[in-house]
Image (cartoon, rainbow, N blue to C red):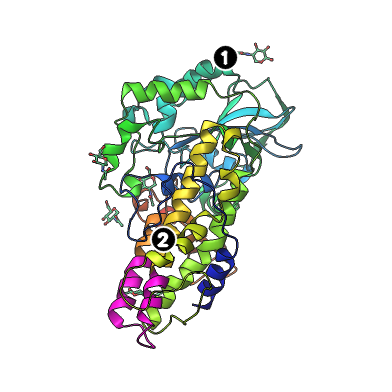
Amino acid sequence: MLWLGILLFALVTNAVQIPLLNLPDEWNLNTPPNPNSTGHLIFDTVSSLLQHWPNTSHTIVPGTLTLPLGANGSPIDPEFARLFCNHDDLGGPCWILTLVTTRPLRVLYFDGSSATKMPDGPMDTQDLLAWGAVLPKRATLSWEYRRLDRLCNMGDPLGFDAYVSEVMLCNFTDGVQITSLSSLEEEPLFPHHGYSFIQSSKWHDHYPGETRVQLDLAHLVSLYDMSLAPSLVGGRVGQERRAHRVLGIDQRDTDAVIARVRAMPSSPSGSGIDWRTQFQVIRDRYATRLELLQSTLNTTGDDFLMPYRLRSAVPPPAGWDTAWAGPVFRVCARAHTSSIESVTSTLTASERLLLASAQETTREICRTLIGMWAQGMLELRASATVPDSLALEWKSEIDRLVDWLGWGVWIKCRPACASDESCYLPGAPFSMGEWNGSVPRCLRLVEPYTGLEDWLL
Ligand SMILES: *[C@@H]1O[C@H](CO)[C@@H](O)[C@H](O)[C@H]1NC(C)=O
Ligand SMILES: *[C@@H]1O[C@H](CO)[C@@H](O)[C@H](O)[C@H]1NC(C)=O
Ligand SMILES: *[C@@H]1O[C@H](CO)[C@@H](O)[C@H](O)[C@H]1NC(C)=O
Ligand SMILES: *[C@@H]1O[C@H](CO)[C@@H](O)[C@H](O)[C@H]1NC(C)=O
Ligand SMILES: *[C@@H]1O[C@H](CO)[C@@H](O)[C@H](O)[C@H]1NC(C)=O
């Protein structure tokens, strides 16, 4: 627990009093987040944009796409594109068209596994823009071109050149140039192409994800924004995160979302804050330490909390109230956001949403950690060890926090894969039946191939 002591000490020394933007300036360690709140969901979806593993389709972001000379178009990696020659219904020779951009393309990006034609969520946000409604029956290949036609025509006055789930270009002669058109050898999909797809998708599994697309987060639209789409709040009550849908959105909210997309400016403008880095700093700061804390609590159970003293926050001699730790909570919760809170007048509406999501997220991390620490300090007034009952309570607190945060960085192969293996999260396109699991496994990338037996048969 030494790290917790060092962290808290560092935080307490730089307390500043600035009012909060959206959250009450109230630091009771016993007030949990509202179960309807979505700040943590926005925080995780935004820090997961352009990465392969995280999986909800709730965010729409404008951006630019630049493919340096020599890079390849459509699925951006040719290892991925090669798969599309193997559809049973296509047959015939396999052609690969390689394009480069002649200027940065203005794109609209949809998060989640949004290139996957499935009726249970990935197409929701695209449908909403294309048809003004979520239409699960249209999650098929035959609707694909009509959906894109709608998006391109709807997007026309705004000038989006392409829509990105995979890259869907509106016009093949505007802003792009053909560098090659090659007929490829006919080869079986597996093992080679399937595995090269897995390798190429792995390059984008985690942060920073696909870097050839640059997002303008200052104009992001999130369907988790409770003021933009209040009609979705009720449908999420009691639902697991993977069940969250845009299906069920009402007309008023649909119109509001479309209006926000139509109002996206043609070039980035905003406060200039690098939100992706801001969010990543928070994730880096807590991800491995929470993971460690969770496993340490699990294995040692008790007497792990080393006593330490903060100069400014001292437990009272008697009683079990934790109010004395409130100032520590306040400083911890605001460590990453207070400098942005002082420039709120320069923020766009989307940036205010991002700030609030970082505030809510760090607030709950700090509430949990400092709640544990404060209890420990009270306990240690009389005894040198922490009782088993409290250790159990802490374990469930950390489990609850980790579950609430739900960060994709914790989805890992345990133990880690060997160097001739790749950590693979079952999902589209090879393991649709297994897609409801969040447990990845190691695949051998060289003979003897293992891990995708269904496809190899
Ligand atoms: C595609 O772009 C070219 C070049 O800007 C333009 O001449 C053409 O009209 C565009 N096609 C459509 C269908 O908009
Ligand atoms: C959560 O949202 C539901 C549906 O809008 C509402 O009925 C409920 O009162 C909300 N709960 C809280 C604690 O605000
Ligand atoms: C933590 O404990 C649970 C059951 O108490 C067990 O299933 C799990 O494997 C443990 N995890 C670690 C990392 O020890
Ligand atoms: C990922 O999204 C798909 C499509 O909505 C869904 O079927 C699947 O259960 C999700 N997987 C996880 C791990 O959430
Ligand atoms: C995933 O779906 C399969 C088949 O529908 C089911 O048997 C299995 O229990 C599900 N697993 C999880 C983790 O939900």
Mark with earlier residue (1, 2) = 1
Q: Secondary structure at mark 1?
A: helix
| Main secondary-structure element of the magenta-colored stretch | helix
* Residue bearing mark 2: 367
Assign a secondary structure to mark 2.
Answer: helix
Q: Which residue is mark 1?
A: 157
- Quadrant (top left, top right, bottom left, bottom right) of the C terminus: bottom left
Q: Is residue 373 magenta?
A: yes
Q: Residue at x 46, y 82 (%)?
A: 307
Q: Is residue 50 left or right of residue 389?
A: right
Q: Tell me which corner region of the image, top left, top right, bottom left or bottom right, holds residue 118.
A: top left
For the point 64% across and 22% down, the residue is 172
- Mark 1 C-beta to ligand 1 under 8 Å: no
Q: Is residue 320 left or right of residue 426?
A: left
The magenta segment: 372-398
Position of residue 426 measured from the top left corner of the image (x, y, whole percent): 42, 54
Residue drawn at (44%, 33%) of the image: 89
Can see residue 93?
Answer: no
Indicate whether residue 228 is drawn in magenta.
no
Is residue 240 left or right of 189 when viewed as pictured? left
Going by the numbered disc 2, the residue's amino acid type is: Arg
Judging depth in this view, the residue of 325 and 120 nearest the camera is 325
Identified at 59% across, 27% down, the residue is: 162
The percent coordinates of residue 376 (x first, y second) are 39, 76
Q: Position of residue 26 (x, y in %)?
A: 40, 52
The answer to whether residue 48 is left or right of residue 236 is right
User: Against 123, is 400 above or below?
Assistant: below
Q: Amino acid at mark 1?
A: Pro
